[in-house]
Image (cartoon, rainbow, N blue to C red):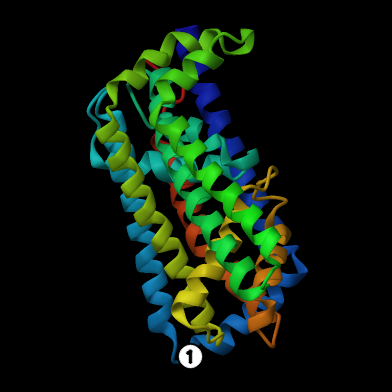
Amino acid sequence: MKKIFQNKLLNALIKLVIFGGLLMVLYKQLFSNEKMDVAITHFWINFHGNFYLLFTVILLMLLNWSIEAIKWKYLIDRLHPISWLEAIEGILFGVTFSMFTPSRIGEFGGRVFALNTERKEAIVSTIIGSLAQIVVNLSIGAFGLLLYVLLIDKTDTYFAAAFIFIYILMVIAVHFCYYNIDVVSTKFSHFPLLDKAARYLHIIDLYSTKDLLKLEVYSILRYIIYCVQFVLLLSFFGIQIPFLTAMMVVAAIFFVQTINPINIALVDFGFRNNVAAFFLIPFVQNPITIIATTVTLWFINLIIPAIIGGISALRFKFFSEE
């Protein structure tokens, strides 16, 4: 009985901390950020007559996270079948939890809290899905950066040749590691810090090369959706760039944002704006439109799902109360 009471208290405290952290993120970014007022003002100026573009971006957000839920359910079902509700709640709570952690690594822990199955094994499956997305983000994003350097910056021949060589090498390396994840993980399992994790590596064997390819296709779809969202918002705020050029620029932006080692929602907001400004400034006369675009995309893709995920966490039991 005492343990049950302690677990109930812990569950209540964790939920309180989650909501407190989420409110801190919202206050930090929405109310104490001097750029936010400028972005909001610019948003309302462009809202009238362009709401259909914004509505499309919101629909794409729903599609984006739905594909991620499909991908995650596909992975977890190999361990223990889960419902679509559990998959969606896990994805959304993962977004909430990731707001407070570097490079959004908290997404792994957040998702598995929605499960009743063996959570440590589920973390391995979740990591595999994230690796698929990382492979796609790096491969397509670096290609966008390569095109940007060649077509927009018009770099010299020697640097371009070196860039192309490094890009091909990187794509081969990340795909080799991804499709041979069992071999790579076994090598790293000999490190003392990873010794305890080694007992769960057998989970990797549940997924064939065909499964990994399917996960990569899902990840490519999500990547395309993100880029299209960005391009639509550029149009929403009056930035007229040819579609293929805009997709190239967005891919370059996304690549640099992806490799940011301190990708925390509390501190990387300015970094996102600076990266977008660096690549978009040749096409934009008013820099405020860049801020407004990144703010709106950030709010739609992360803050709205994080709020919903935080609300869904009310029904989670992080520790057993039975």
Residue closer to the observer: 293 or 131? 131
Residue at the spot x=44%, y=92% of the render? 49
What element does badge 1 sit on?
A: loop
Find residue 125 and report its horizontal and vertical position in percent: 38, 27
Residue closer to the observer: 248 or 127? 248
- Determine the image quadrant of residue 81: top left
Q: Quadrant of the C terminus?
A: top left
Left or right, 216 with reference to 194: left
Find residue 300 and report its horizontal and vertical position in percent: 49, 64
Left or right, 162 with reference to 173: right
Residue closer to the observer: 109 or 209? 209
Q: What count of labels does the image hold?
A: 1
Residue beneath label 1, please? 48
Instruction: Bin the neighbour count of mark 1 within 10 Å (Cα to Cα): few under 14, some 14-19, many 20 and up.
Output: few
- Determine the image quadrant of residue 41: bottom right
Left or right, 311 with reference to 75: right
Find residue 159 and report its horizontal and vertical position in percent: 70, 59
Residue closer to the observer: 114 or 146? 146
- Determine the image quadrant of residue 20: top right
Q: Quadrant of the N terminus?
A: top left
Left or right, 167 with reference to 247: right
Q: Is residue 298 visible?
A: no
Residue at the spot x=42%, y=40% of the render? 132
Residue at the spot x=69%, y=50% of the render? 266
Q: Residue furthest front?
A: 158
Q: Residue furthest bottom?
A: 49
| Residue 50 vertical placement versus 122 (above, below) | below
Q: Amino acid at mark 1?
A: His
| Residue 4 vertical placement versus 228 (above, below) | above
Q: Is residue 215 visible?
A: yes
| Residue 81 vertical placement versus 56 (above, below) | above
| Residue 316 vertical placement versus 186 (above, below) | below
